Image: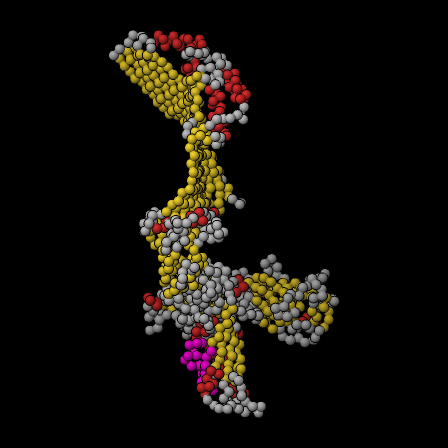
Amino acid sequence: MAKGVKKIKVTQGKYYPKMSVPGQRVTIVAEQDVYFQVEEWLPNTTAEDKKKPVIWMRQTNDRKIILFQSPSTTGYKFYMQKKFCGSYNFYVEASFSGQRDFKNNVGLYVKGWCEPKIITSKWSYQKDSPSIKNNKKAQHISYGHIVHLNLQTEGLNGNNLIIELWNQQYAKADKQICVYTDVQVIDGEVNLKIQNTYAWMAHVDNIQNLEEFYIKVKDQASGKYIKDNLGDDLHAIYLNVKNKVATTNTNVSQNQTPTKVYKPDVNSARIEPCKFEVIKFTENVVKDGKASNSTVTVFDNGKGIKRIKAPDERIHRTIYYKFDSTEIDKDGLEVLNNILKFLLEHKGSTINLSGYACVIGKENYNKGLSQRRADVVKKFFGSGGLDLSRIISLGKGEVDPTDDKMGRDNIKYKNEKDYENNRRVDISFTFHAHDAQTIIYETLAPSSDINLTVDVLQHVNKACFRDKDKHEKKIVVKSIEYKQPHEIGASSLAFPVNSQLAWGNIAPLNYIWPSFNVLEMGSSATVYSIFVNSCRWFSNKNNAVVQVKVFPDIKWTVEFKWNHDQPFAHTFGNKLHPYDIKEGRNKVIGAETDRGWSKNYGEMDQSFALSLKAEWNRITQGRSSAPQTMELGHKWDGKIRKTLGIFNKMKSMTERVSNSPLSKGRAKFTIESPKIAFAAQWYLERAPKTAIDLTTMVSIGVSAKPLVEAKIEVDLWKIFIKFGGDAVCPGAGSIISWILDKLGKEAGMHFIISISGGIYLDGKVTINTSYPKETSGEVKATGKIQVIAEFKAWAKGGIGYLAFEGEVKADVSTSVTGGIKVGADKKGIYAAPIAEFAGVKATFVAIGTVKLGIFKRTLSYEGESRLVMPDEIKFEKQYIGQ
């Protein structure tokens, strides 16, 4: 029983069911991909057979010409332009052998549908010549001249049209002059050669010196007028005809096919039999200290290749004949079948067939014999589905003819072997070879050699079409690192690579930016060139197919830290003005102003650290050695004068306050020293969007905890009470002092108000330099305010057996956070402001204990209250560049 394809079907894409007949024909939507696959196999087809490539053939409606064929294991994609839509049907068929089945309809007729339109229309003097411009009165024809009409259409391919010729009239309706029927649309075009313009003259009313003509187009099947993109049904406006007779001939108009210029196919889809399909690299990577193999596909059937050059390659093949014969022998059939398959899969090339004969026999006879030999080859190609209009066959007669002037055969001797090579047909054609841009694959490696493995899949070179310097099934790796290239005649090769980075030289400084060599102003990579050429995709054997760039596995970290070793803390004394706090405050400010900001502000205890650290050969972790590091940095401790002037000024201000009327211990004022840290890291890693590239990742972090922070504590009790100095209110202070004196020596009170606040900065941003849209992170600045009030009183003895102790504490706090968040989504890189209010929160705690004799009781209360609820402001994303 036979095996192969029995039926095919549409599996994906849009089509019109009402315009289709299941199993026979399908009408597809224009300019959309429609996929065909095998629906049913012949009974004897095995599972292994079904995995083999099937040759898909797109043919003309009469199935005489194969327009294009392609082998595939996944099906066939059909994309129909609007110009090819219409009543014309293509035939799609599939088979294992590439031989068409004329007995059984194993394929489908396919046509496309879109709205019928006239896209362009023009008159011209000659076919394919420029348009006759009606706005130039000098461009015209005379009655009797031949004129050509060209229409570019959509949705009308294969249709028959009626073309009506109209004469523009003034002051009355336009008049129809002539009608042309059965005008065919071929390949989306109308090319009508009109040879009866003299007959127009008789139908023109009141003929003028220069008449203007236009056409209207009607679909012969539907009877509807065809419009253009603007909805107008008047076309080819206008043809100027001068009132002059050029000739009285009125020949029949001719419907012509579009002019075809055969050129080698330059399309990116390639199906030469000399090819490879996949290139993969396998390398050892380390993640989280664990080594594992990682495989990266750098080439997959031409996907993603760039800048394809298409140099002309002239192909020559020859078949030979026996003496006085036109029969193609077995060797010749093998050559012709190979060429036919190649030509069917490469559209456009013009094929030249040159037939020859030896000098044995009469020259005139041999001339005819050479033509018959060429025609036999042409017939063979035509029977195989090749468009015969692509073929030029020419019999060139004898090779080095020897007949004399009388036509007599004038050879000196007749040895058949001497003339075997002259009984032949030379077949030649040009096609565009493919020489795609070299693929760049980037990877990391330590300074010592590690192996990188390249695998080339489906590598076949036996059918190389080159006449000279044929491609071989071979992988060659070249580098300045090698004395001799690494080479293997197989599909897999492991070769050593390294990054040329060692501890014993200044190399780490030479790789500050891993992908760019600062000292040499170029790439810091070690380069390895891989040659695995073939006719398909990479035909030039002098150009590398893949260039491997090996970069040093180095990670840089720069850190900056700045700290003050102690806060600016000072305590107020008891010299506050007895009645007017405002006046006392003004005296403080006045004293500070008088002193001046430009004085020497003294020295401060600070520390400043800056370090640059390099870590490389991390890729060897878990295998052979630990990573190597180098650190460059400097740190200063102790006294550094004027590091940041603003903080020196803060220190100076607290010193002035200590010498003001607010002195001697009633309040404590503290400005917390700033703690600022900045860190940045940059390193190479595999780019997330494309596996063959490395990208430089930059991570920046900043922290200031705090940037600014201040705290003031005031004992209100001491402000009222006189302890060796003036009180704010001496009368009230005397009364309270008397009460405490009566309570006894073990009695006291304090009432402390503490107010603190600051600004704190924290954030981290990660930048992918190759793909900025993957930038992410946020930076926040938070402002915090806290108020704590604490009252405490106690007494023991002094009033018989009574004792008590009590404490009340209140904590009110709030914070405001502002910042910016950066990131990326489908629209691009964005920045979104951040604004959050934590609300106002109050906490209360009260504890009291009373003891009278043996009786003791403790009372407590605590609570929490939200004075103001939290809130967050939502900001819209602001996209960069929009």
Horizontal arrangement in the rendering, residue 709 relative to residue 224 (left or right): left
Residue for point 46% across, 69% down? 345
**Split into 4 quadrants, where in the image is the N terminus?**
bottom left
The picture quadrant where one finds residue 8 is bottom left
**Residue 273 coordinates in the image, percent (x, y):** 42, 69
Residue 864: within the magenta? Answer: no
Residue for point 53% across, 25% down? 599
In the displayed orientation, state which residue is furthest to the left.
Answer: 854
Task: Give the magenta part as a residue range.
Answer: 318-336
In the displayed orientation, state which residue is furthest to the front.
Answer: 504
Residue for point 68% across, 63% down? 134
**Residue 733 coordinates in the image, percent (x, y):** 42, 10
> 95 above or below 294?
below
Colour scheme used in the picture?
secondary structure
The picture quadrant where one finds residue 150 is bottom right
Given residues 496 and 274, the one toward you in this image is 496
**For the image shown, how many numbered marks are present on the structure?**
0
